[in-house]
Image (cartoon, rainbow, N blue to C red):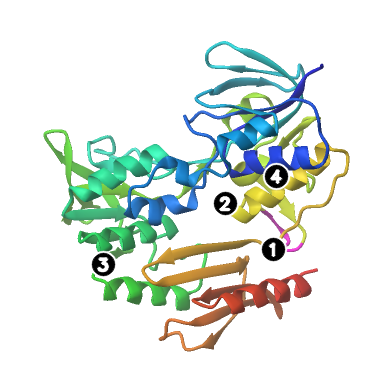
Amino acid sequence: MGPGIAIVGAGQAAASCAQELRRRGIDGSITIFGDEGYLPYQRPPLSKAFLKEAQPPTRLLLQPPQFFEQQRIDVRTSSRVASIDAAGHHLSTVDGTSFAWSALVLATGTRARVVAMPGHDLTGVFTLRGLTDVERLRTGIAAAKRVVIMGGGFIGLEVAAVARGLGCDVTVIEAEDRLLKRVTSPVMSAFFERLHRGHGVAFGLGARAAEIVGNKGRAVAVRLQDGQEIAADVVLMALGAEPNTELASAAGLDVANGIVVDDAGQTSAKNVYACGDCARFKSRRFSTAIRLESVQNAIDQAKAVAASIAGAPQAYDPIPWFWSDQYDVKLQIAGLSTGYDEVTVDGDDASTSFAVEYRRQGRLIAVDSVNSGRAHMLARRRIEAETK
């Protein structure tokens, strides 16, 4: 039997791609290389329910071990890929193993962004990306009275909600002048600020951290650029994510805030594909190049890549959707609001159930729905119709 298919990365996109390859009748070997010690697992619960309450890691697995055995998918955990030879069709792992492939899928995902400010490596300073991160953070929060979160995006606000629920004093520092500025409108930013303030969260908006202050090797405060100090037992850097593109770049593939792929998931090298959080592609629907960090994209783009490998390429140009759970509020986002020129509110934004619609040149491009699953599902159909 000749070389099979190698998938680098062991998250949602990797698992979805492997499963779809089998569904499409690909019978050769499929090998997944993951640098964590776990089978592919869900990441969204890490900043929500899994952080709030300790559970066995097996609860997060996308599929049980026997699924991969039955499907003849070889998942190599704790197996970090060190280099890729795109022309020679082989890869090498850090332990020196060489592996030949006929097709390669890069599903390398992202990593938490870390700002190398003074004190970033102190005990009590955390990031949140994987299972090990959340287990460490949970232990830290359980022993903490004061939590400072750097970043007012989804991860930061979700962790703020959990920490407040556990009785911690919480302060969120956000460099922008409002929360969630990169992904939503002032209306929605104001709603979430009111929500969190109502639960006792303090905010420093338009504030930048200059240093994490330590004492005997532990974080004790965050010092802002204006000199103010905010006491902290735990500091979470929730500053967004960076795509893992180093392997692709070293292999000579096109990289630009993600691994550049066409609408079939093909990179700039033949028989090398990329999908999920690490991939950047041109959306004709939204007239821009995008890199999506979402479960929807990880699943659907992985399926598109599998279709390409199986010889049935299909153009991938989705209606993205995302969600966030904070306290008793579920935010669901359909579409991409980037570049909107009109915002309308459907319902009362002072309530806990309403929607915000975004248009560009009269076309509906995104809808944010608060506690309204029906509005979200309708929005996905409406955006599909208006962005064809």
Q: Which residue is mark 2?
A: 293
Does residue 288 show up magenta in the picture?
Answer: yes
| Residue 319, numbered label | 1
Rendered view: 255 above or below 200: above
C-alpha span from label 3 to label 2: 26 Å
Secondary structure under the numbered disc 4 in the rendered image: helix
Does residue 278 show up magenta in the picture?
Answer: no
> Which residue is at a point 49% across and 33% down the rendered structure image?
38
The majority secondary structure of the magenta stretch comes to loop
Q: Quadrant of residue 335?
A: bottom right
> Which residue is at a point 39% across and 42% down the rendered structure image?
56
> What's under tag 3, amino acid-wise?
Val
- Horizontal placement of 1 versus 343: left or right? right
> What's under tag 2, amino acid-wise?
Glu
Q: Which residue is mark 3?
A: 201
- Horizontal placement of 244 versus 298: left or right? left
| Magenta stretch in the rendered image | 285-289
Mark sitting earlier along the chain (1/2): 2
Tell me residue 169's x, y (percent): 19, 61
